[in-house]
């Protein structure tokens, strides 16, 4: 990778930087600190926190390492957010991370991020969360089911391409993905009617799901302690299998060291804590962005990570970590083998019986609805920014004449997301892209170092806390996780790389026809 920056005088560099990183004048400044923070938290909290601890527990087989996995995720997330805060304050433009990569490493890298975001990361996550909403709604209305087909049913056979396993999914419209489509269409249309309307929905649902997580922790402390679980998970057993010399079976009979197992376990916890960067996509609509963007990133990630760690302590106090897949009771199955990995539901059922399971289903539906709204609201701003740069369909850069929202971008995103809902491929694609998501975080923080060198004169209202040490530690830790995943989880890594790399010829096809609007220029070469 080479970064070609044309020689310039300090004055000309400052002028070019000011031209290309000015705030978006055409967008409405409708997000204050509260709304921006709610967007951070609401985009992060989906259904993952209620599910992934089961798989993490199977991989690490240690209460200490279960908590350790979430603490590592918390460290990476908060350091990443603090680093992004500097970039967000420097470049308060719609598109966020796309803009940071474009300006630091070049337009190709920005495009590859936006391409992957549109194709899989954002739209695939929305589809998956929407279908999960339908799945839990089916608890109350059994007619909503993945087996209740309305038309177009087709079983795609499984086929292999190197380490990739493709296919093996059902394509068509059923009542479950119909609910997902209704949610996606409803929220996409609502978000056309102004950033304040979308923010209001986000604030209400984020407050509800934060309250649900906090209630789980409070009730867990007061009522949820189970003597059998406490005896099994705490005391001397807390550190069981946590020694550096311990070998862990991560599937297929593969034995790895504790640090390697902890890195592999990050797949679930990092994904559950992801999307905190979505507030940067809406930077052009944030009031006083030089203050509110860094602050919302720090506050939002800090609160969510504290809730996530607290929830996992509650899980450990209510259910034994170790269990059996053939167990007939919640305590016998434990966290490792909670039914369908629904740890949160198992814990609430253990505490309050069937009513507890129903309450958790409602909490997950609220969480999913709010998460979908945040992802829909934020993602459209990236495709809008790409279109303004001539790297996406030009019509996507159009704003609604009255509400000044990226209406066309919202509709294009909506259509592709609905296709993914019907295709049944979103879950498979999300598995493939986890590795690539981390790669883009690494590249963006490398961009922080690049911009410190190439644009020392740029205005920095906020500077990354702990720079250069903390961002450098982030890069080293994230690289280690990616290398481990590349080695031990090729089915989750090589396919993600392939999806990203497919964007290279697409970029050059767009770039060959690229025409910037009059008055626009790029400092990236």
Image (spheres, rainbow, N blue to C red):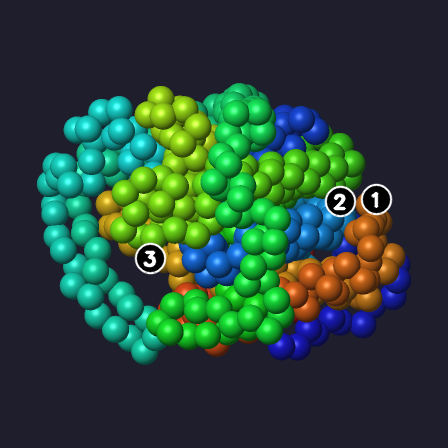
Query: Which image quadrant for residue 119?
Result: bottom left
Report the quarter where the N terminus lies.
bottom right
Query: Mark number for residue 140?
Result: none
Q: Position of residue 103 (x, y in %)?
A: 68, 59
> Do the numbered discs 2 and 1 sit on residues whose CB atoms are within 8 Å?
yes
Disc 1: which residue: 461
> Do the numbered discs 1 and 3 sit on residues whose CB atoms are within 8 Å?
no
Identify the mark nearer the N-term, 2 or 1: 2
Q: Is residue 93 above or below residue 472?
A: above
Q: Position of residue 213 (x, y in %)?
A: 54, 30
Q: Residue at x 83, y 44 (%)?
A: 461
Closer-to-camera residue (245/415): 245
Query: Mark number for residue 428?
Result: 3
Closer-to-camera residue (334/199): 334
Q: Nearer the viewer, mark 1 or mark 3?
A: 3
Measured Cα–Cα span from mark 3 to mark 2? 35 Å
Closer-to-camera residue (396/211): 211
Query: Mark number for residue 89?
Result: 2
Q: Secondary structure at mark 2?
A: helix
Q: Secondary structure at mark 1?
A: loop
Can residue 384 be seen from the camera position used here? no
Q: Residue at x 38, y 68 (%)?
A: 251
Measured Cα–Cα span from mark 2 to mark 1? 6 Å
Q: Position of residue 434 (x, y in %)?
A: 47, 59
Q: Position of residue 163 (x, y in %)?
A: 34, 75
Query: Which image quadrant for residue 453?
Result: bottom right
Q: Residue at x 27, y 51 (%)?
A: 326
Q: Is residue 460 above or below residue 183?
A: below
Identify the mark nearer the N-term, 3 or 2: 2
């Amino acid at each position: 990778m080479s970064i070609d920056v044309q020689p310039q005088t300090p004055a000309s560099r400052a002028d070019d930087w000011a031209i290309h990183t000015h705030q978006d004048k055409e967008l409405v400044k409708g997000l204050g600190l509260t709304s921006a923070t709610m967007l951070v938290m609401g985009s992060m909290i989906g259904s993952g926190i209620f599910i992934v601890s089961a798989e993490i527990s199977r991989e690490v087989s240690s209460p200490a390492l279960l908590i350790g996995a979430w603490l590592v995720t918390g460290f990476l997330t908060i350091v990443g957010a603090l680093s992004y805060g500097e970039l967000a304050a420097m470049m308060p433009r719609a598109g966020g991370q796309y803009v940071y990569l474009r300006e630091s490493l070049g337009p190709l890298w920005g495009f590859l991020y936006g391409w992957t975001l549109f194709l899989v990361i954002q739209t695939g996550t929305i589809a998956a969360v929407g279908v999960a909403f339908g799945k839990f709604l089916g608890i109350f209305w059994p007619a909503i089911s993945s087996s209740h087909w309305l038309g177009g049913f087709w079983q795609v056979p499984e086929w292999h391409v190197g380490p990739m396993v493709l296919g093996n999914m059902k394509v068509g419209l059923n009542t479950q993905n119909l609910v997902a489509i209704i949610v996606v269409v409803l929220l996409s249309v609502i978000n056309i009617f102004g950033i304040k309307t979308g923010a209001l929905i986000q604030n209400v649902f984020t407050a509800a799901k934060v309250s649900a997580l906090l209630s789980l922790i409070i009730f867990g402390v007061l009522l949820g302690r189970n003597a059998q679980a406490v005896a099994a998970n705490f005391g001397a057993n807390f550190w069981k299998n946590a020694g550096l010399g311990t070998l862990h079976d991560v599937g297929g009979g593969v034995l790895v060291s504790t640090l390697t197992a902890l890195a592999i376990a990050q797949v679930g916890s990092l994904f559950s804590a992801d999307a905190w960067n979505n507030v940067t996509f809406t930077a052009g609509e944030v009031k006083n962005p030089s203050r509110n963007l860094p602050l919302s990133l720090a506050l939002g990630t800090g609160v969510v990570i504290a809730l996530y760690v607290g929830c996992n302590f509650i899980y450990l106090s209510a259910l034994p970590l170790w269990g059996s897949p053939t167990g007939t009771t919640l305590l016998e199955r434990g966290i490792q083998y909670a039914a369908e990995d629904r740890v949160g539901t198992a814990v609430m059922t253990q505490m309050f019986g069937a009513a507890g399971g129903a309450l958790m289903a409602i909490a997950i539906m609220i969480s999913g609805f709010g998460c979908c709204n945040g992802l829909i609201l934020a993602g459209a701003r990236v495709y809008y920014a790409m279109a303004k740069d001539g790297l996406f369909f030009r019509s996507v850069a159009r704003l609604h004449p009255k509400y000044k929202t990226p209406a066309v971008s919202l509709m294009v995103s909506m259509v592709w997301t609905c296709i993914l809902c019907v295709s049944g491929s979103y879950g498979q694609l999300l598995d493939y892209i986890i590795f690539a998501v981390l790669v883009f975080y690494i590249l963006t923080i490398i961009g922080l170092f690049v911009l410190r060198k190439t644009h020392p004169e740029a205005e920095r209202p906020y500077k990354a806390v702990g720079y250069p040490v903390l961002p450098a530690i982030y890069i080293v830790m994230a690289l280690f996780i990616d290398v481990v995943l590349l080695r031990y989880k090729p089915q989750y890594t090589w396919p993600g790389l392939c999806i990203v790399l497919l964007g290279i010829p697409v970029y050059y096809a767009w770039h060959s026809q690229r025409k910037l609007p009059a008055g626009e220029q790029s400092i990236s070469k």
